[in-house]
Image: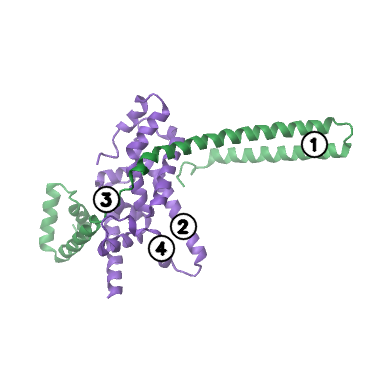
Amino acid sequence: MTCQDHKDLMMAYLDDELDQQQKRAFEEHLASCAECARQLDEFRRLKQLTDSVSFIEPEDRIWQQYWDNVYNRVERGLGWILFSMAAILLAIYGGFKLIETIVTDPDVGALLKVALLVLIGGLAILFVSLLRERLYFWGKDRYKDVRR
Amino acid sequence: MESFCEEETLALWGSRSSTKDAFEAIVKRHMKDAYFIALGLVGNHDDALELSQEAFFRAFKNIKQLSSKGKFFPWFYQILRNLCFSHLRKRRVRRADSLEELDGDTIQANVSDVFDPEMVAERNESKDRVWKAIARLDDKHREVIVLRHFQNLSYEEISKILFCNRGTVTSRLYYARKRLKEILDREKGGRQ
């Protein structure tokens, strides 16, 4: 084993994560390697220093209100989903009614009606094209499960 | 501390009368761990509270992704750490935008400014120095220091929640401590 291998063992030795046999082997190495012994000593001092740092415990009211705050987010999230769905449905319904009114209104000129229908046709093609592209790439994307 | 990785969290799910009650039990069981881990990663109370609560909210939204055999905390931890790291990235980008000509080290030092020294219990000069040095570590190095020193997790537990093997935990801890020591030594040298 090289000193580099022992450096990995050094952390586990420091944190008392070695079994008896590994511990003995590492201590034997320490006895014969001044460099590793010196490093271990430095890491031991650093560990003591780091272990001495702890966090202030927040006031009790933070823990008492914690779940309520999480639940409020859940509730508001649900509220936003319902609101968005209803807004989309109402917008589609309103748009449909508006188009129907314009198309069936005899006072509206034929040119405007044709332009409106072409506009709707264009939007529909764009929507279908985008949807198809998304579905096609989603099926073929090898990285879709990779966490970003 | 009870193990993060025990199966019983999910058992709670089936034993409660409603989803809300079950999730409430899970949140109450893990809220302190979530808050203190976030505090170690982002360095101040307000962000830690906000991010840990947001992580629970996202966990609730996506709870179906957790397979029945999965354990709640390792899965939840991925959500929490991604949120914290993404928060830190945004903070760095904001700082970099406002301080255009600074190099990486200076930006990291500026980000560490928001690590609130008031969060450290029984403060003294050496603890403040360590906390400041931890703030200046890379995210992944700070993460193992937080999990090992502040959460007192074993290597086994750390490897479970980081979804890596024990060897990776050991070597990441080695480099994190080495870097921590370098920062402390450099600072000590600079003050002399």
Q: Which mark is residue B148?
A: 3
- For label 1, the crowd category at 10 Å Cα-Cα, with few meaning under 14, some 14 to 19 and many 20 or more, is some
Of B164 and B107, which appears nearest the observer?
Answer: B107
Residue A90 position by quadrant: top right
Q: Which quadrant is the N terminus of chain A positioned in?
A: bottom left
The numbered mark, 2 or 3, whose residue comes first in the sequence reads: 2
| Pointer 4 residue | B108
Q: Are marks 2 and 3 in contact (CB under 8 Å)?
A: no
Question: Is residue A2 shown left or right of residue B84?
Answer: left
Q: Do marks 2 and 4 share a chain?
A: yes
Which residue sits at x=31%, y=74%? Answer: B190
Does any portion of residue B163 appear in the rendered image?
no
Is the same chain shared between marks 3 and 4? yes
* Residue assigned mark 1: A117
- How many residues crowd around disc 4 within 10 Å: few (fewer than 14), some, or many (20 or more)? some
Residue at the image point whose x is 44% and y is 32% from the top: B64
- In the rendered structure, which amino acid carries the disc numbered 4? Gln
* Chain B representation colour: purple
In the picture of the structure, the residue carrying the numbered disc 2 is B91
Mark sitting earlier along the chain (3/4): 4
* Chain identifier, colour green: A
